[in-house]
Amino acid sequence: MSEALYRKYRPAKFADIIGQDHVVKVLEAEAKSGEISHAYLFAGTRGTGKTSLARIFANAIGTSKDDIYEIDAASNTSVEDIRSLNESVFTLPFESKYKVYILDEAHMLSKSASNALLKTLEEPPSHVVFILATTETHKIPETVLSRCETYTFKKPSQEVLKKVVTTVAKKEGCVIDDASAELVALLGDGSFRDTLGIVQKIIAYSKDKRISEEEVRLVTGAPAVELVHDVVSAIAKKDLTLGLASVKKAVSQNIDISVFLKLILHTARAVLLVRFGAGDGVRDELSEKEFAFVSDLAKSDAEFSSKTLITLLDAYEKTQGAYIPQLPLELALVNIIGEK
């Protein structure tokens, strides 16, 4: 079995971390100066590098593998688990200056477990460093937050993910065209891990190691770009018949409606930004073909407004778990275009 790409290309040093300079620079300076905090909180959406940077920081302060403890708080939520941890922290490191405890999904700790952990955070042994990682900071008790040095991780931009896709594909002996890399980056949804997961599936599927947009769509279930353009054009031309027919076609092709709507939103947003003179901000996110389509619509008399995007966003949020998945999109088109 081949190694997962997100593990194979996991950052191993500070310089490998992409898009988190505001965190890396501070932690790197602390590691060099030796002014180490006893507790850190890394907050951010999934796949943004929180655990990877925690490991890198632990290594940078001279902690060996035997003195780094990774704990999945989602599986160790009870007060008994944390009491056991609290007892272990007083044991001296095997061969390092510090023992580093990385608590992933820290927001999953029960209230009693958080209270038990708080006692150790208040008066930790000098040889212990805690790094809590979470995707939901608001679920961490304020008493715990106040005792941690907090860093918020940014979601990587689509441009950054696109470069990662191209670079990793090349390292794996594949060639991926611009439009395909753009689509993978968009479907990666701001996560390095999810993006590389998609790349791995596509590489496994590709026969000649030349990845095409069609292969990406086949593997991910994403709709053909023409279908996305049909819906956006329907909005622009106020053609409800075309819009609903396009949705019906997507359903008949078993296309994931959430993915379909995400791509529609992506294109509609670009039209609006180009129309109001912010084209440079999206040019790097789009292939030449997509940018040409967007530019033509932006120059036309098409009625695209912020309300259009708000309606589509609302439909996207309602799609997950909808009894009829396509219904929120159909209703959005009716509201935007208007019944005739």
Image: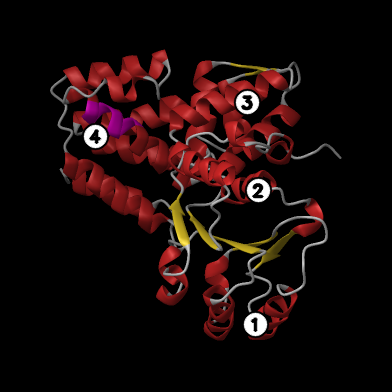
Residue type highlighted by circle 1: Ser
Residue at 13% across / 23% down in the picture?
A: 301
Picture quarter with the N terminus: top right
Specify few, some or many for label 2: CA neighbours under 10 Å numbering under 14, 14-19, or 20 or more.
many
Mark 2, residue position? 61
Tell which circle, 3 or 1, labels the residue nearer the N-terminal end: 1
Identify whether 224 is placed above or below 3.
above
Answer whether residue 270 is magenta in the image: yes
Q: Position of residue 159 (x, y in %)?
A: 45, 27
Q: Which residues are magenta?
A: 267-273
Identify whether 22 is placed above or below 122.
above
Along the line of sight, the residue nearer the viewer: 217 or 324: 217
Between circles 2 and 4, the one closer to the viewer is 2
User: Magenta stretch: dominant SS?
Assistant: helix
Instruction: From the viewer's perspective, tell me whether residue 274 is left or right of residue 177.
Output: left
Along the line of sight, the residue nearer the viewer: 254 or 5: 5
Residue type highlighted by circle 3: Glu
Mark 4, residue position? 235
Tell which circle, 3 or 4, labels the residue nearer the N-terminal end: 3
Mark 3, residue position? 215
Q: Position of residue 12 (x, y in %)?
A: 68, 37
Tell which circle, 3 or 2, labels the residue nearer the N-terminal end: 2
Tell which circle, 2 or 4, labels the residue nearer the N-terminal end: 2
Between circles 2 and 1, the one closer to the viewer is 2
Specify few, some or many for label 3: CA neighbours under 10 Å numbering under 14, 14-19, or 20 or more.
some
Along the line of sight, the residue nearer the viewer: 218 or 310: 310
